[in-house]
Image: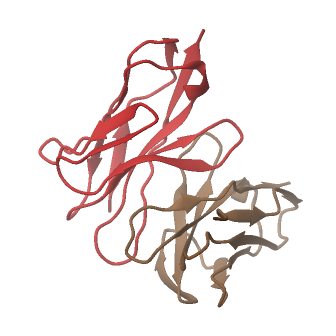
Chain colours: A brown, B red
Amino acid sequence: ETGVTQSPTHLIKTRGQQVTLRCSSQSGHNTVSWYQQALGQGPQFIFQYYREEENGRGNFPPRFSGLQFPNYSSELNVNALELDDSALYLCASSLPGSPAANFGPGTRLTVL
Amino acid sequence: GNSVTQMEGPVTLSEEAFLTINCTYTATGYPSLFWYVQYPGEGLQLLLKATKADDKGSNKGFEATYRKETTSFHLEKGSVQVSDSAVYFCAPSNSGGYQKVTFGTGTKLQVIP
């Protein structure tokens, strides 16, 4: 059984640029959530996708957007990057209605 | 929304010591409760879970019991090892609607030989 995978592992961008992060969900999991984890903090919920539609969102501005594809993989897009966007971005997949989520290893984004 | 309060770290223990990490939560409805662990430089791993009151979750020698009356989910282990050094997150999920897990700031555990 393949777990959650994310790419790239690390990324360096400059302020104002745009970035796309990718996630492949665990086999059979059709719900994908994204979290942002700043250094020394707990993860913060960004949004969740189910059946290719966003069905829940945390307190993040619209420049954070996402997509889910028919194979349940997902992208997180961040426009107009700010220095405070530097963080570990975690993707988690789960079955619908299941409270347990499996997390990927994360993408470390650094904004200079 | 949900919130979590965990004991502040770092918690430093000698190998084979008893571990307790306290966790209390506020939530509406009947959340499921989780403990996640994050090893240095890695993502989150689900350590254990409990989905209803009085359930006990257990894994790898760790245990936690869902106490609805005290809204607590304390993590315990009888004998810690150096390999248990990590950051531990207590996390309730919301009940109903979409599944969202709320994390606190975590408790860092350091186990010394």
Query: Is the residue A89 above or below the residue B56 in the image?
Result: below
The residue lying toward the viewer, choosing from B6 and B81, is: B81
Q: Residue furthest front?
A: A1
Q: Is residue B85 visible?
A: no
Instruction: Identify which residue is drawn at 43% across, 78% down.
Output: A96
Q: Is residue A15 visible?
A: yes
Instruction: Identify which residue is drawn at 20% across, 45% down.
Output: B71
Q: How many marks?
A: 0
Image coords of residue B46 (percent x, y): 49, 50
Image coords of residue B42 (percent x, y): 68, 44
Image coords of residue B47 (percent x, y): 47, 44
Q: Is residue A62 left or right of residue A24?
A: left
Image coords of residue B48 (percent x, y): 41, 46
Query: Is the residue B11 above or below the residue A47 in the image?
Result: above
Quadrant location of the N terminus of chain A? bottom right
Q: Is residue A13 left or right of residue B56?
A: right
Instruction: Identify which residue is drawn at 51% across, 15% down.
Output: B12
Query: Is the residue B61 above or below the residue A76 in the image?
Result: above
Instruction: Identify which residue is drawn at 43% across, 28% down.
Output: B8
Q: Residue furthest left?
A: B69
For residue B75, which quarter of the picture? top left
Quadrant location of the C terminus of chain A? bottom right
Q: Is residue A52 left or right of residue A22?
A: left
For residue B98, which quarter of the picture? bottom left
